[in-house]
Image: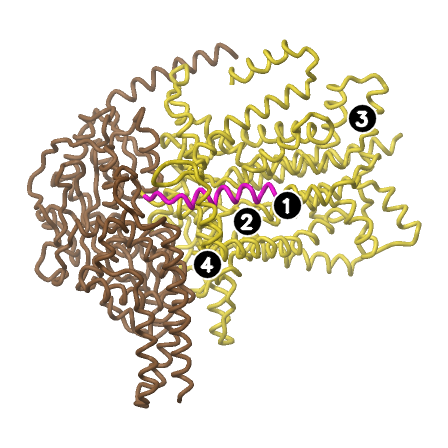
Chain colours: A yellow, B brown
Amino acid sequence: MPDSYQTASRGFTLFPRLSGAAISGILIAIFLMAFLILPVAQVLYVAFLDSRTGGFTLQNFQDFFNTSLFRESFVNSLYVSVMSVVFATLIALPLAYITTRFNFAGTAAIQALGIIPLIMPPFVGAVAMSLLFGRNGSVNLLLNQYFGFRIPFMEGLNGVILVQSIHYFPFILINLSASLRNIDRSMEEAAQNLGSHGMRMFRRIVFPLAMPGYLAGAALVFIKVFDDLGTPLLLNVNNMLAPQAYLRITGVGINDPMGYVISFILVVFSIFSLWASFLFMRGKDYATVQKGGGGLSRRDLKPREKWLAWGVILLILALVLSPHLGLLLLAFGTIWSFSPLPDGFTMEHFVTIFTQSSQYVWNTLIYAGSAALIDVLLGTAIAYIVIRTGLPGRKWLDYMATAALAVPGVVLGIGYLRMFHGVQLPFGLGQLSSFWGIIIIALAVRRLPYALRACMAALQQVSLSLEEAAASLGASRTSTIRRIVVPLMTGGILAGFVTSFATAAVELSATIMLVGRASDAPLAYGIYLYMQSPAGRGAGAALGILAVVIVALGTYLSQRIIERERVRQTMSNDQH
Amino acid sequence: MNKTMTISALALIMTSSAAFADTVTVVTSFPRDLTDPFKAAFESAYPDTTLEVVSRNTNAAVSYLQETRSANSIDLMWASAPDAFEVLKEEGLLAAVDVQYEGIPDEIGGYPIHDPDGTYYGFAASGYGIMYNTRYIQANDLPVAEEWEDLKRAEYNGHVAMSAPSRSGTTHLTVETVLQGEGWQEGWATWKWIAGNMNTVTERSFGVPDAVNSGATGFGIVIDFFGLASKASGFPVELAYPSVTAIVPANIGIIENAPNQEGAKQFVEFLLSLEGQEVLLSPAIMRLPVNPDAYANAPEDFPNPFSEEFAPNAIEFDVDVSGERYNLVNSLFDVLITYRLNDLRAAVAAVQQAEAAHAESGNEEALALIAEARALIEAMPVTEEEALNPSLTNVFTSSSADADTEVVGRQSEIEQSWDSFAVQNYRQAKELADQAIALN
């Protein structure tokens, strides 16, 4: 971005006293303007046009509220989002609590398994779910055969809530765990000294202290579910807002402004709910001074408790990993049709993908890895600017970045084509819009909210007094950030990296518009190619498994790094 | 660092200029199973040319071509839905190129194979049919449905699926075929009774064969190659061709301003040659060649749309009427059926129960209530004349080019009035049918 650097340096000479934070703030604002706001505005402005005369009008918004289908869709979307947050909390809370509160053998593995549901490859996931839980899925076929009844897991809004809460609960799990690890042990000890323990202590002391992380996760789940169009569409539920927008935007040769009106309303509502969650957090201080003490003290479990804990965890994991079990069966199965299990098992699908997959895997790692890196850099910077500086309009950085959640991938894709097509890159790289780098930018913009929420939560738990101490010892602001703030935020930053990376690895809706040629295609695109034909179902699933394994390995490794870091810190702490 | 950058940049320039010299770039919605054999066959016939395949679904392909027209890099558009080609043609995105071919007739099943203006060419034909899962119907003890009429019967309640015509150009043609074959009023009645038996209306056309293959639903209204290819891949499914079916070509067209127009023309001519046509017969593709001679080497049981016994009642498809009301029919189907499927299903189920309850009772009062309920379900907010009147159809068209035409309102206004019409009628129909049941 030579342009933005220029602008910034010009700004620097004009206002010599502009601080580093202000410059980064301006740079980030320019980045978001160029790659999010302007491209999206190029598509969404249609919402304000009279479709016949082309003049400005607000009539379309009046039509929106006059249409009963849209009003019902709004209520349905709201209901599904709230219920998904409730169920996601029920799933995430025990996992997070048990793994951070007790000395538990499989902590890293459970945390890594906990993120796998986020990696749901497009299309295959829905097929796998309906093969297991659908009206004639394995569970219902067996129930019907032995007990003569069926459970409508996947019917209508129920299905959307089930799939969404299984899919997105890791947002809560990851952010809540990071928060729990950061709680000062002395708080807990003080509570114990005053006679509090057990559930009461959890309710009154521990959970409230972990609130930034929980709220960061819950807000993400809420907004994401509200704005998600993929899941309802795959379950053929169209009486919700996001699918209505999608259906009206993507029809061939149709010029219905309502799709853009709905998209606009989705963006506004998402920013509104974010603002509401800020209000809730306002005036509360969650920072704790002591760091490196390893967070909550970890207790050993008594044998009976251990069995109970394992029971709860295995039950939850069985539920949330069932779609991936279905995926596994699909990838290794031959024909699976109207039966509890596939007719036979084979390695054939993996052989099919073997020759073509290395290019996909490599592209995916580069795209998702770079995108996640950009995200944590931007996320940390935005979090610091919003929470620690007094720059005017700083909250708008957060609002802008978070608005990306509500922008359907196709809208962003079309916006990029509209804005960047015809821009020639130097070095013979061709069109900017078909250059693979634009895929990275698109992924980074779409996944930035995930990293941002994690970084915000992490910074909220860092006490300002630590920075003041550093400053009074003569450290410059830069070195305070580098040596004090960022290390203390490590857990949150890693959580952000992992969520961004995992979800970017299976993103399809924006990339499908931007992939210029087959050799630039990521895994999700390969899955899409296979899933267009009956013979490709198994191969698509096999490719999906590959994606899941790669991302899970990445997650496991980063969990191990966090754990090692903690152990190292605790040990060096004890020596003092 | 700088050195590596420069070297790799130079390498990129060299490879890209070498690659673009004789590359034909095609954007397609077809799966690999179809494009790979053609790529192999074409490249062995023309060893100097490479076929670069870019896959996008039809909607994304059309938007891509629209958005990138200022600096087009695509030579060919290759997809099923004729309506997508109509949109591209209308916007001047397709080039009229004089393609040479022989042995291909002008029409198939009453539908013209090539665009009369020569901007796109049909290379394969597809019929519509009813695909069913044999394990499913055996377990549920259902007879095979062979005609559209069969799917209206009460025994199929909850066992049928199709995709929305607004999402799939080929489904649209099936809907339109029935409307033209049975007439506006009766045709819509047929669709409503069939839809009352559906358990889902899918958003992707491939969602239907997926649901039938996995046994989520018993019967699916699909384009034939989905059924044929699923069967060829080993799924326990069969395909029945109803006697009223639409035979539609899948198409290829050369893009205006194509970087390699000569190569693009070569590929189209290869597709239409006998050699290219025979590639269609391979088991993973299973599409019907448009050259009758290609059937000489077809496997046994391969359907031949040029034969006497194939779909004897195929109608004379009126392309103009279909084009005129294209978006209006899609919108009507979405508002009356897709978005109100639950209301429609409840009403249809109630009528079916009432009819079963009074099949032999001869209770006149109940029969009158049932007849009234049926009429409410079948009622349409728009007559055939209105549906062809530009002042209504233009509400739904994409171009505001003919802004002179007076229109009767905005799309969302009209859809809202249809929606309340449908919701109210379906609810009343259900109440009447419930009253009839209670009369026992």
**Chain of the residue where label 4 is placed in the rendered structure:** A
Q: Secondary structure at mark 4?
A: helix
Asked if the residues shown at circle 1 and circle 3 are in contact, with their CB atoms under 8 angstroms apart, the answer is no
Q: Residues within 10 Å of mark 3 (few under 14, many from 20)?
A: some
Residue hosting label 3:
A467
Secondary element at tag 1: helix
Instruction: State the separation of the CA atoms marked 4 and 1.
Output: 28 Å
Q: Where A152 sits versus A210, above or below?
A: below
Q: Chain of mark 3?
A: A
Q: Label 2 is found on which chain of the structure?
A: A
The residue that label 1 is drawn on is A219
What residue did someone put label 4 on?
A130
The local crowd at label 4, few if under 14, some if 14 to 19, many if 20 or more residues have their Cα within 10 Å, is many
Q: Are marks 2 and 3 in one subunit? A: yes
> The residue marked by circle 1 belongs to what chain?
A
Q: Amino acid at mark 4?
A: Ser
Asked whether the residues under marks 4 and 1 belong to the same chain, the reply is yes
Query: Residue tagged by mark 2?
Result: A226
User: The residue under label 3 is which amino acid type?
Assistant: Glu
Q: Residue at x 77, y 59 (%)?
A: A305
Horizontal and vertical percent position of residue A502: 55, 39
